[in-house]
Image (cartoon, grey):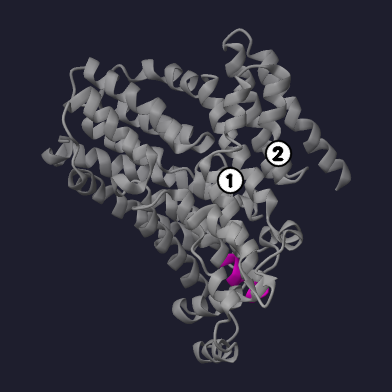
Amino acid sequence: MASRTTLHLILGPALFAAVVLLGAGAMAYPVRCALGLLLWMAWWWVTEPVDLAVTGFLPLGVAALFNFVPMPRVLSAYAQDLIILLLGANLLTTAWARWGIDKRIALASLVVMGTNTQRQIMTWFVLAMILSAFLPNTIVAASLCPIVLAMLKFIGVEDLRTSVLGTAMMVAIAWGTSVGGFATPLGGAPNLLTIQFIQDSVTNREFLFVTWVTRFLPMTIGLVIVSIVYMRLAFRPEMAEVEGSRTFFLERIRALGRMSAQETWALAPAYAFLVCGLLCFAIRKNGEPLITWKYAQANMMWGLIYLFAGGTALGEVLSESGAARFIADALAPYASGGGFGAVALFAVLAITVTQITNNTAAIAIVVPIVISTFQGLGLNPIPFVYIVTALGNCGYALPSSAGGPAVAAGYGINLRTMLWKGLGLAALSLLTLLTIGYLCAVYWPGFAQA
């Protein structure tokens, strides 16, 4: 075991060095460094020779040593608003554990959703999908994952890394946020960015909310069905049913008695960010604060914050260095013939880029190329932009893919499982969305309108 860990420790920087040294003839220095860093972080995230949070700090160290992107851009990724969101949510869930509200939440989840673990996985997936259609993915994941964690701990699942059920439920939330993220324009920044590109470069008029929802509805329905079937086949939880019945869990809730004042304050919504978390230190009952800093310091999941920041920083590095655009530009000439081949190429490009960098960066890179390519061919780019945008939201495999996977990874799930199962779902998403989107483009005249 020690020798294997040592091997993985060496292979991470070795991959970085190989890309930097061997790619000198074909790629610019910043691009080589960024792609090398991607391989290094992916290798360490999957093999885990060091803690996941430690890998999250690699962008800082590597960028400082090799000077291939401006350090302020990398540093800013560790202090963005979503990091503060996670910090606030983590403070609140620490207060939950301090006063036992996590037990109430866990029991309520079991009463409402039932004890069948497959049903639990599917329910959390659908809930995350619905919420992410109207809220940013990271906010949805940051709000739901602590509730799932509380329930898992209640039923005896302490180590998510070794639990198929624990990893599956967290991944279900992460993937649900990605699948539902493109259903409406409110799903996040990638959608708003696409609308901006369409308005500025194609239509020169306002893009309507209802237009987006109707055009993306067939692809959303298709991907939801495929995702549910895939997850049922891909995950085999170690327990089929949670011990106990609905009556038993209702009795346990009643046995807890009325909620105390401390529990009520601790139940503030996670999306209230840092303010509610900070209030936990100030609000007192009988002279005792909801949580003390000593308790928070010992019980908070600091690794979640650092890992999320590292994934965000990696996405920033890939975008700022030009590495993601290098990949796009290298493939763009092969789409010059137009037709299904061009659509398929851009579809592959979109879902590949969104697995390695965040979905907003993927859209920012791929959509303008799609618009310019198809306009150059004298074709209406709108239907192909829709397809690429849907695929650009499908980040599943790495913590750098999207907010949902980053949050789930931070809770200590099995990253190897998320990677390989995520790549499987990415392949199915590619086939599903490309097929449905192309059929809509051919047989539905309204699909080409914006």
Mark toward the viewer: 1 or 2: 2
Question: Which of the labelled discs sits on residue 311, or is there none?
Answer: none
Residue found 60% across the figure and 44% down from its top: 308
Q: Is residue 366 magenta?
A: no
Residue 72 pos. (x, y %) = 60, 24
Residue bearing mark 1:
419
The answer to whether residue 178 is left or right of residue 276 is left
For the residue pair 409 and 108, the one nearer the viewer reads as: 108
Residue found 43% across the figure and 68% down from its top: 123
**Is there any visible trace of residue 344 in the rendered image?**
yes
The answer to whether residue 432 is left or right of residue 328 is left
- Residue extending furthest right? 2
Residue bearing mark 2:
55
For the residue pair 206 and 329, the one nearer the viewer reads as: 206
Residue 334 pos. (x, y %) = 37, 18
Q: Separation of disc 1 and disc 2 at Cα?
A: 16 Å
Give the magenta-colored segment's residue range.
148-156
What is the quadrant of residue 381 in the picture? top left
- Residue extending furthest front? 287
**Disc with the residue nearer the chain's start (1 vs 2):** 2
For the residue pair 95 and 247, the one nearer the viewer reads as: 95
Label 2: state its secondary structure.
Answer: helix
Residue found 33% across the figure and 43% down from its top: 433
The residue type indicated by label 2 comes to Thr
